Amino acid sequence: MFARCSSSLVRPSVQVRIFRRFQSTLVVAEHNNETLNPITANAVTAAKKLGGDVTVLVAGTKVGPVSEAAAKLDGVAKVLVAEGDAYKGLLAESLTPLVLATQNQFKFTHIVAGATAFGKAVLPRIAAKLDVSPISEIVEVKSADTFVRTIYAGNAIQTLKSKDPVKVITVRGTNFEATGAAGSPAAIEKAPEGDFASKTTEFVSQELTKSDRPSLTAAKIIISGGRGMKSGDNFKMLYDLADKWGAAVGASRAAVDAGYVPNDLQIGQTGKIVAPELYVAVGISGAIQHLAGMKDSKTIVAINKDPEAPIFQVSDYGLVADLFKVIPEINEKC
């Protein structure tokens, strides 16, 4: 015998809807009011890997050309522009409230900038105000909430998953190819307005070192000197060679601390992170702090009279010789 079930005993179907927050990223542009810093194009590449729309924020005094350049980057959906004296010198104290106001209006899931002195000054402040943990110097994007970064001066790789509602990230530019030009420029709009000028900090002036040589972060060839150079005058050998090769000149922290060269030439964990096509280390022993800043170079050549120098462990080509004999010979033959 079969009995028909009463309709009152049948459980009604339940519809379950899953709401997922749409991914969107704000890239804070770095520039000098005239040209866009190349690191911004690298940051946009990382932002595209996060998924969703990419918006670039350009703040400064007269940023028309910069905002137009940002709009031409592939993958950028919108450019927000903030102009005014408050952003003179791109002080972190003034940019932070601007970014927070922008975040409050658009509700981005990610805020990104390059892992430069600029990005390292601005983004930790933003993270603190949003009460989230900053994620510094990522080298890879696994997913929208999972990232890879180096720790212990590059001797270990860490994969981390962030549960924060807003991810605040700095990007190591050497690990992300710069995005190309878009087929058509993105829309340019005004950023949120307000009195964002810092009440405690004022930009007075800056003195920039001018050189015909390429910058360290953009150079395809870098010649670096270390403590083995013995004096600042001896760096002239490297300057002469760099001029012939169209290269940039860098230095280890030991050379900078000894006063041989200014600190804007320092490469390493506490200096600039570079990854040129060719890196020539002259008189550099190879401390882990220095290796952290250059070991991603495509080809590494080391010149050192100590055959046990750690730099030889990461170099593709090594020459055990007196640099004061080798460099003049190379200069003569170039």
Image (cartoon, helix red, strand yellow):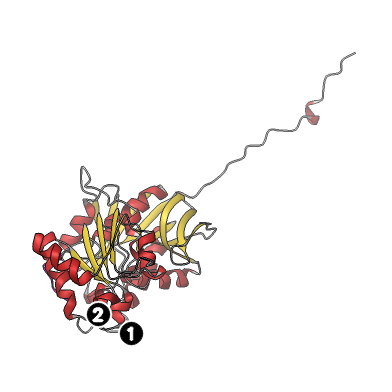
Asked where in the image residue 263 lies, by quadrant, the reply is bottom left
> In the structure shown, which secondary structural element does the residue marked by tag 1 occupy?
loop
Q: Number of numbered discs present?
A: 2
- Residue 195 drawn at (x, y percent): 31, 76
Q: Nearer the viewer, mark 1 or mark 2?
A: 2
137 sits left or right of 133 in the view? left
Between residue 329 and residue 52, name the one nearer to us. 329
Residue bearing mark 2: 230
Chain part drawn in magenta? 209-213
Residue beneath the point at 32% across and 67% down: 116
Q: Residue at 29%, 57% (x, y): give it.
A: 300
- Please tell me whether the stretch drawn in magenta is mainly helix, strand or loop: loop
Quarter of the image with the N terminus in it: top right
- 10 Å crowding of disc 2: few (<14), some (14-19), many (20+): some
Q: Position of residue 177 (x, y in %)?
A: 30, 51
Vertically, is 332 above or below 178? below
In depth, the one of 245 and 174 nearer the eye is 245
In the structure shown, which secondary structural element does the residue marked by tag 2 occupy?
A: loop
- Asked whether residue 237 is in view, the answer is yes
Q: Which mark is residue 141?
A: none
Three-letter amino acid code at the position of disc 2: Lys
Q: Earlier in the sequence, mark 1 or mark 2?
A: 1
The residue where tag 1 is placed is 199
Q: CA distance from mark 1 to mark 2?
A: 46 Å
Q: Quadrant of residue 306?
A: bottom left
Instruction: Say whether residue 142 is left or right of residue 38.
Output: right
| Kind of residue at disc 1 | Lys
Tell me what residue is drawn at x 21 percent, y 50 percent. 72
